[in-house]
Amino acid sequence: MCPLPLAAAAVAAPRAPLRLLNRGLTAAMSTARSLKSVDYEVFGRVQGVCFRMYTEDEARKIGVVGWVKNTSKGTVTGQVQGPEDKVNSMKSWLSKVGSPSSRIDRTNFSNEKTISKLEYSNFSIRY
């Protein structure tokens, strides 16, 4: 289990109000700009280093929706959706930053496409 940094613990506590805010954000993103969707797989030391938790936190900070999960191959995979500039910011983070203890060898992006509406209402960790 990954220990939550103190700031993350404080932010993680009030989930219900954030969900309500997120619904408004989702509606605003759906009509404001061109929306993109992209699948990703991150290779390297990305399991056992809180990578999913940090990915979820970063996605929420940037303002994108989607999901992240570990694979049986030792990689992390997922999907990101949102305005093109925000998706690009998340792609950069997934390629270069990751969690503090991670080592990203490479990140593959696939199925990048323009979408008419978001398929998710938030960003979540899948198991």
Image (tube, rainbow, N blue to C red):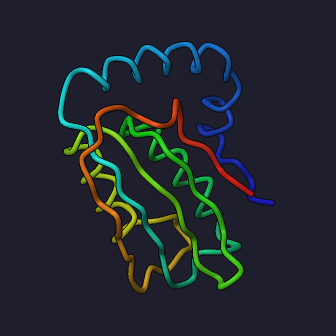
Callout count: 0
x and y, in percent, of residue 30 in the image: 31, 25
Residue 59 located left or right of residue 8: left
Q: Name the residue at 40% across, 64% down.
A: 94
x and y, in percent, of residue 39 in the image: 42, 62
Image quadrant assignment for residue 83 = top left
Picture quarter with the C terminus: bottom right
Q: Nearer the viewer, residue 111 or 50?
A: 111
Q: Nearer the viewer, residue 14 or 73?
A: 73
- In the depicted structure, whether residue 101 falls above or below residue 119: below
- Residue lying at the far right in this picture: please name it: 1
Residue 100 located left or right of residue 33: right
Q: Nearer the viewer, residue 113 or 14?
A: 113
Q: Name the residue at 18% across, 36% down.
A: 34
Q: Name the residue at 29% across, 60% down.
A: 112
x and y, in percent, of residue 17 in the image: 61, 13
Q: Nearer the viewer, residue 104 or 8?
A: 104
- In the depicted structure, whether residue 80 falls above or below residue 117: below
Image quadrant assignment for residue 54 = bottom right
- In the depicted structure, whether residue 125 falls above or below residue 99: above
Residue 27 located left or right of residue 69: left
Picture quarter with the N terminus: bottom right
Q: Name the residue at 51% across, 36% down.
A: 120
